[in-house]
Image (cartoon, rainbow, N blue to C red):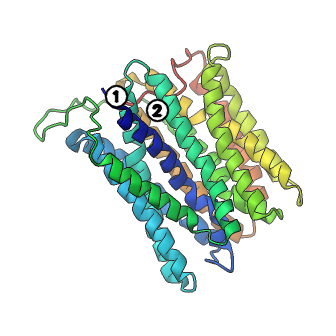
Amino acid sequence: MATAREAGVVKAAAVVQGIALVTFPAASGIFTSPSEYGLTSTAYGAMFVPQAVTAVASALLGAGWARRVGSRRVYLIGLAANLLAMTLLVVSSLFTSNEPVAYGLLLLATTSLGIGFGFTVPALNTFTAAFNPTKVDSSVLVLNALLGLGTALAPLFVAVFVGLGFWWGLPVLTAALLVGLLLVSAPLALVTGTRAASPGSSRPPRASTPSRFWLYAVFALAYGICETMNGNWASLDMKKLGASTTMASLALTAFWASVTLGRVLFAAIRLRFPTRRTYHLLPFVLAGAFVAVAALPSGEPGLGVLAFALAGIGCSALLPLTISFGQEELVVMSASVAGGLIACYQVGYGLAAFGAGPLQASGIDLSDLFAATAVIAVGMGLLAFVIAHRREAPASLHPRPV
């Protein structure tokens, strides 16, 4: 049985991980500002490629490491990797006059952040399920809400620190929180009730991948593209429309806050509004939001905040429901569904985070890219009917950790 201190540390870690995850997109205006880093759209997007690669690799490796050395060590390594990322980001701010050095440090920072995310988040889900065995669904929902709270806070913190004249206050604050978490977490047992596998232990035979898994994989990849177009490019789109740094940060906050609130809302009403209908509806809401973003007029930042908030609602429950549907249908590989789909999501993240940069460099306006992404969202809507056609709704919106 977990102590109150252990449970509190896990919840605090979820908030801090959310802040760390969105620190780089939240500071997009700093990275592309000629008076700061002066990165092009292509260079800014390329920053996130190492993060996507290492997040996929660490998430897949982390499951095996957790069986061998325990989730506690994986979690601590993840916190340390996040701390290294924030430290490198702060150090890079000292070399903005030397672009190659600064950019190299940024690439190392996002590489480390991907490792931190891939190790920490699965471990937190494992702890939450183990600490609350009689109410896994509600506890995982709370954990994801806290993670979402962190993602919504990061842009607000950036706006505050930019207003104070030192944007790097956010990574300094995040680093301080991570140091505190490491100091508090290190003495804790954080026992999950699972035993580490011995080197000679037998493993279950690997089952073949069902063909329908690839439907889920395509959906998760497309979702990664759609979420990342909002999460990584919202602030820059708002700046192009003439919004202030504060309003650009508010738009990003509105997106992540709506993602979180939407997940809580659809989990709360799932008995009255079946999750299958939610799954069918949300891609089209997301497509409408992309069209609205693409049509935003200059000088109307308030409309931009509303459009990105709508995009957050459209994104909210799609990835959790994709994993939940997959786990309940693909029983022969249920233990690996979540990891596989998260990997596909991260591939989509990498495509959108990097791909939008070269496309802008070739002359395509960012608003046109948002319009094109609406087509991807419509495709997700059609695929949602194929995936969840005549299927029983999953027992929970948020998938249970394995």
Which one is nearer the viewer's eye here, 320 or 161? 161
Residue 292 vs 363, above or below: the answer is above
**Which element is circle 2 on?**
helix
- Residue bearing mark 1: 130
Mark 1 vs mark 2: give the one in front: 1
Residue 365 is drawn in which quadrant? bottom right
Instruction: Give me the residue at 72% from left, 44% from top.
Output: 375
Query: Disc 1 versus disc 2: distance between alpha carbons?
Result: 27 Å
Task: Give the residue at x 68% y 39%.
Answer: 258
| Mark 1 secondary-structure assignment | helix
Please give the residue where the numbered disc 2 appears in the rendered image: 213
Q: Residue at x 36, y 28 (%)?
A: 131
Residue 377 visible, this orientation: yes
Question: Looking at the picture, which amino acid does disc 2 mark?
Answer: Phe
- Residue 135: image quadrant is top left
Question: Percent x, y for residue 272?
Answer: 67, 13
